[in-house]
Image (cartoon, grey):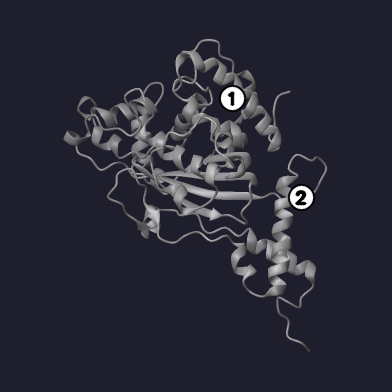
Amino acid sequence: MDRITLTNIPLEIRDIIIELVITTRVPVPKRPAQMAGRLKSVNPDINPLSNEGYITNSLSLLLVNRQLHAETKAAIGRFLKGAKEGNEAGKKRRNLTYTYDIMLVDDSYVWPSHICVPALSPRVDNLVVTIQAFGTCPVTKASMSGVNAFRSDMGPTEVQWAFYRPLVNLLRDGPGPEMWTSKKPTQRPVIEALSQLGGSNRGITVGTLILDFQKSTDNTATNDIYYKWAADQEGGLFQPWKECRGMPSQIDGWEDVHRIVVRPEWLMRYLTMRLSFMLGMSYHTSQYSSVLFERIGKIDIRLNGVNVRVIHIAEKLERLNFSHPMDTFGHLPSEERIAAFQKWKREVIQLRKDRGLPVVE
């Protein structure tokens, strides 16, 4: 009797195995200690970077032999076809999902990780990003005054930049180690995809961006301190927590409060509020917001896996309407702003149609 191997079992079973390999996820890091291999940088604008580049799950199968190479390419083709036909109703298809994890570490920087990228594609059904917070910025009462990653002088905060940069790099350039490096964004043209030759073919288009804010082990470890402090507070908790971190000399018991790791519900509300502000295409945000309209169908906000809110980008786009030059496109001369906005809106609506993203007719 012939020995049973992967190459001589029935094709239907082998297809199932191949698809399982392609969609297998690496474990989500549970503590920053698991990220010890990150390369450090003396540049404060560079996030810690993994010294091992991520390899798509399909690569190992593609290199085994000609048979598995062909069958793996066929399996990838089914995922890519499914993503391309995302808006065709009634078709049974395979969703193409990219999965990432982002740690906010010590309120200061992010440690992103590739969890699963089955195959490279310009169109992805779902982009799932789990978000956890670990640690607090190590400071003393003397050094804390005026230092707070959640506060800024009118502009975006360091925490906002930390999450904005990897997301935008992924959308514009696709998966790769360089998407994680810089904390701060460069100022690019408002519609980069349309303003550079061939730009509209780069990066990825996402049907649904899922941001899942999850309770970390550090949140659990500081539960007692958090609940004791919260019991004495009236109203919201996030604002007094931020105030304590910025001005500890004015807060009794600041040492204990400082040990409280930012709660997932706080981070969810904070970043969702900032995201909604960006989607307003205001005087200050329009230069950085266009890519969200160009490349995302909708955004699902989750807390510990439970749906909290859905942001429909098409509806946001439809409601955008400006008549005063002080309301939008602040990076352009005043006399050009309204005409530039109107042109941008027309072009982005067409771009969304071309990419299979929903629009409001």
**At which x and y percent is residue 23?**
63, 58
- Residue extending farthest to the top is 324
Residue 357 numbered mark, or none:
none
Q: Residues within 10 Å of mark 2 (few under 14, many from 20)?
A: some
**At which x and y percent is residue 234?**
38, 21
Q: Residue at 58% across / 45% down in the picture?
A: 202
Q: Tell me the amino acid under the disc marked 2.
A: Arg
**At which x and y percent is residue 98?**
59, 50
Q: Which quadrant of the structure image shows residue 24?
A: bottom right
296 relative position to 272: left or right: right
- Residue extending farthest to the left is 142
Split into 4 quadrants, where in the image is the N terminus? bottom right
According to the picture, the residue beneath numbered tag 2 turns out to be: 93
333 relative position to 64: left or right: left
202 relative position to 13: left or right: left
Q: Report the Cα–Cα distance between label 1 and label 2.
A: 34 Å
- Residue extending farthest to the bottom is 1
According to the picture, the residue beneath numbered tag 1 turns out to be: 344
Vertically, is 353 above or below 80?
A: above
Numbered disc 1: secondary structure: helix
Q: Tell me the amino acid under the disc marked 1.
A: Trp
Q: Residue at 68% across / 35% down in the picture?
A: 357
